Image: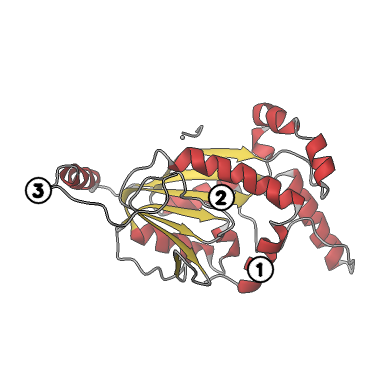
Amino acid sequence: MNDPHRSDALAAWLDTPPGRYLLAWEQAQLDRVVGDIFGFHALQLGLPQLDALRANRMPHRWLSTEACGVGALSADPDALPFPERSLDLVVLPHTLELARDPHRTLAEVERVLMPEGRLVILGFNPASLWGLRQRAGRLRQSLGGTAPMYLPRPGEFIAYWRLRDWLRLLSFEVEGGRFGAYRPPLRSQRWLDRFAWLDHVGDRWWPVLGAVYLVVAVKRVRGMRLVGLARRERAKVPAAPAVVTQRRREPHDIAS
């Protein structure tokens, strides 16, 4: 399960100028990516500050949070209330950083995903300028300093290549990834705006140094791909006309 203190710290930080800057980049990337993922059932696990599924067209979409609200589902990320191979899309926005056991959370997501189902992950990049400033702040605090760190303390940041290794062990195949948010670790909106030009330069010249990354992976199950595709083909030709009664708001590919 997630630590509520970590969730509260991240939620408070996201209401700061750098937090809002990060949310804007992440929301734009999610809108572009999930709009081209099709199926019937999608789940966003955590971080209600993002509407990760708003551009997705699946008829059944859930937001799982620690406190259940309108249109939300309260669920433990280590024990999701879904049967095996029942979801077509799961989005984890900084969920692994908040999880007490990120390996277990990933294994649970693998359990509930359909063969060929998609997994989208957002995480802080420890190799970025933001990550370096965070480590410097932790060092100062360990030496008795009182200066606050730049980022919240949601847990251990997971490096992009390390995450890819974890996914490979669970039979996920990474389809693509992207880094973003290249402005320096500044707290003032005025100074963040002055360095807006770095978003274009960094995306071209030093992409792996972005403050955050997005990963899209697909669940591969040996010997099951054709079965999954056949199931979807049958679903396209119903025996009788059907009316969709459960639908949320109506509201694209990423580089490898």
Question: Judging from the image, what secondary structure is the residue with disc 2 in?
Answer: strand
Of the two numbered discs 3 and 2 in the rendering, the one whose residue sits closer to the viewer: 3
Mark 1 and mark 2 lie on one chain; the one further toward the N terminus is: 1
Residue shown at the point (64%, 56%) measured from the top left: 157
Closest to the observer, 53 or 156: 53
Q: Quadrant of residue 201?
A: top right
Label 3 – label 1 distance at C-alpha: 48 Å
Q: Neighbour class for label 2 at 10 Å: few (<14), some, many (≥20)?
A: many
**Residue 90 picture location, percent across and down:** 42, 54
Q: Neighbour class for label 1 at 10 Å: few (<14), some, many (≥20)?
A: few
**Residue 74 picture location, percent across and down:** 46, 71
Protein image colouring: secondary structure
| Count of number-bearing discs | 3
Residue shown at the point (63%, 44%) measured from the top left: 24
Q: Is residue 23 above or below residue 75?
A: above
Residue 239 disc label? 3
**Residue 14 picture location, percent across and down:** 68, 56
- Left or right side of 166 for 132: right
Q: Which residue is mark 2?
A: 122
Q: Which residue is mark 1?
A: 8
Mark 3 and mark 2 lie on one chain; the one further toward the N terminus is: 2
Mark 3 and mark 1 lie on one chain; the one further toward the N terminus is: 1
Residue 83 disc label? none
Q: Amino acid at mark 1?
A: Asp
Question: Judging from the image, what secondary structure is the residue with disc 1 in?
Answer: helix
Q: Amino acid at mark 3?
A: Ala
Cβ–Cβ under 8 Å for marks 3 and 1: no
